[in-house]
Amino acid sequence: MEEQKENQKGSLLFLIFIIVGFIFASIGAGFALYTQHLKKVCSESVTATVVENVRIAGTTNRGHTKRGATYAPVFAYTYNGENYIRQSNSSSYPPKFFEGEEVEILLNPENPEQYYAPEDDTIKILYIVFISLGSFFMIFPLILLIGISSGKLQCVSVKETRTYVIGKKS
């Protein structure tokens, strides 16, 4: 009976790992798909100037500021005679761009406020990290399961703990 409960706990742990992995991989895939969408619809190249780097303060769940602030560039650009000023959705530390720097951005001709900066690889790094972590969390328990079921790995249950004290003989 006890062994069955331990097997259920182990199965639950495997399932939790796989679910967490799936969630991480899905978030990474979402970032990747969004980036691909932007690359597809943003075809018009314009030169933008970084007018500011907005400090994005990290906060705790109680609203306190914590160290680790990042900076999001604010781009100013002109398209079809209209001036636009847009803050990037991605931020980094240190800032990716310097104030006054000219950067090529690609914008959506149907919606000039939608753009992406090919030089900004922050989102790419995020989706690689999320997909990698998600894959690890999904694959690792499967490798363990295969190893255990093939007999190459053993699942050991420790029921009794003993403490030994090593000291000088009197």
Image (spheres, rainbow, N blue to C red):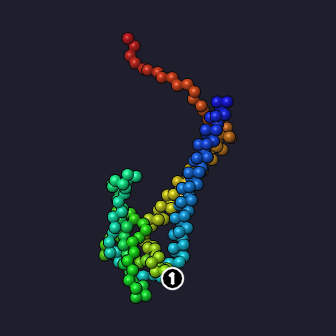
Going 45% across and 78% down the picture, which residue do you hit?
Answer: 113
Q: Secondary structure at mark 1?
A: loop
Going 36% across and 63% down the picture, which residue do you hit?
Answer: 56
Does residue 36 appear in this view? yes
Quarter of the image containing the C terminus? top left
- Total number of numbered discs in the rendering: 1
Residue 64 point in image, percent of width and height: 34, 53
- Residue at the extreme bottom of the image, as rendered: 81
Q: Nearer the viewer, residue 51 or 155?
A: 51
Up-down relation of residue 26 to residue 3 (above or below): below
Residue 54: image quadrant is bottom left
Quarter of the image containing the N terminus? top right
Residue 57 point in image, percent of width and height: 35, 60
Up-down relation of residue 85 to residue 25 (above or below): below
Residue 169: image quadrant is top left
Residue 110 point in image, percent of width and height: 51, 82
- Residue at the extreme left of the image, as rendered: 100
Residue 3 point in image, percent of width and height: 65, 31
Going 56% across and 62% down the picture, which residue do you hit?
Answer: 29
Per the image, the residue denoted by label 1 is 110
